[in-house]
Image (spheres, rainbow, N blue to C red):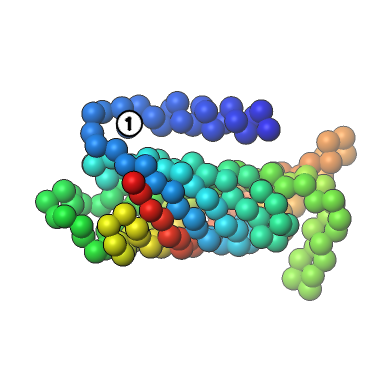
Amino acid sequence: MRKLILIIVQSVAVLFPSFAQPTIRKFGIETNQFIVQSGFGTSSELQLNISDSLGKRLSLGLYYDSKLKNIGGFSISILKMVGNYQKFNLPMIEPYLFYNLIYHKTNIDKQMVSENYFVAVGTYKSIEHHAGFGLRVNIITGCYLKGEIGYGFYLGSIMKPSKSDLVLNESYGTHGAGAMIKIGVGTFF
């Protein structure tokens, strides 16, 4: 858990200078449902974010693994709105580019067997990087729906595990590339 907190603090310290210019900031909260091709499947996430008037946003959050029914890791997202929307009061649709990092650490205490997969007992770790395109649809002032589609690579997979370390009983899995699809709803204040 200490490593998780250190990673979040270090990420904020590295990414925060881009938000250090004097601009108007808004804070927000959003909830998302996403699916990734690394084998972890569909999950939900709750993110807190800070955005500025130039269209940049930094989000930090935790995600809930729906397959294993527990908090499975954390996520960091950076996005940049495409175009200059300052001249409009509230545009209906706002396109943006994003980068998303997801860190998974999953402890399996009993085997999971299905006709599509087999997951052995052990600890699985993975880190995923996705970049892509998104759309935010403003419903009313301060409330929006969003959708993202991206592609990236993952280091580790739960559905395609490598042989577990005999001492630590941890598997970092195989590596690969895959898509991510995310939909969500959020508010800012």
Q: Secondary structure at mark 1?
A: helix
Please give the name of the residue rendered at 39% of the width and 50% of the height, measured from the top-left corner: 98
Residue 111 in the image: state x and y as whole percent: 85, 58
Q: Quadrant of residue 186?
A: bottom left
Relative to 51, 166 lies left or right: right
In this rendering, is residue 17 above or below 87?
above
- Residue 174 visible here: no
Please give the name of the residue rendered at 45% of the width and 26% of the height, measured from the top-left corner: 13
Q: Nearer the viewer, residue 143 or 50?
A: 143
The furthest residue to the bottom: 115
Mark 1: amino acid: Ser
Relative to 124, 56 lies left or right: left
User: For mark 1, what is the residue?
Assistant: 18
Q: Quadrant of residue 55?
A: top left
In this rendering, is residue 92 above or below 5?
below
Relative to 91, 125 lies left or right: right
Residue 30 in the image: state x and y as whole percent: 45, 53
- Residue 45 visible here: yes
In this rendering, is residue 139 above or below 110?
below
The furthest residue to the left: 87
Residue 94 in the image: state x and y as whole percent: 27, 58
Residue 146 in the image: state x and y as whole percent: 39, 61
Question: Quarter of the image containing the N terminus?
Answer: top right
Relative to 165, 42 lies left or right: left
Please give the name of the residue rendered at 46% of the width and 63% of the height, measured from the top-left corner: 183
Q: Quadrant of residue 118?
A: bottom right
Q: How many marks?
A: 1
Question: Badge 1, how many Cα within 10 Å: few under 14, some, many 20+?
Answer: few
Please give the name of the residue rendered at 35% of the width and 60% of the height, measured from the top-left corner: 144
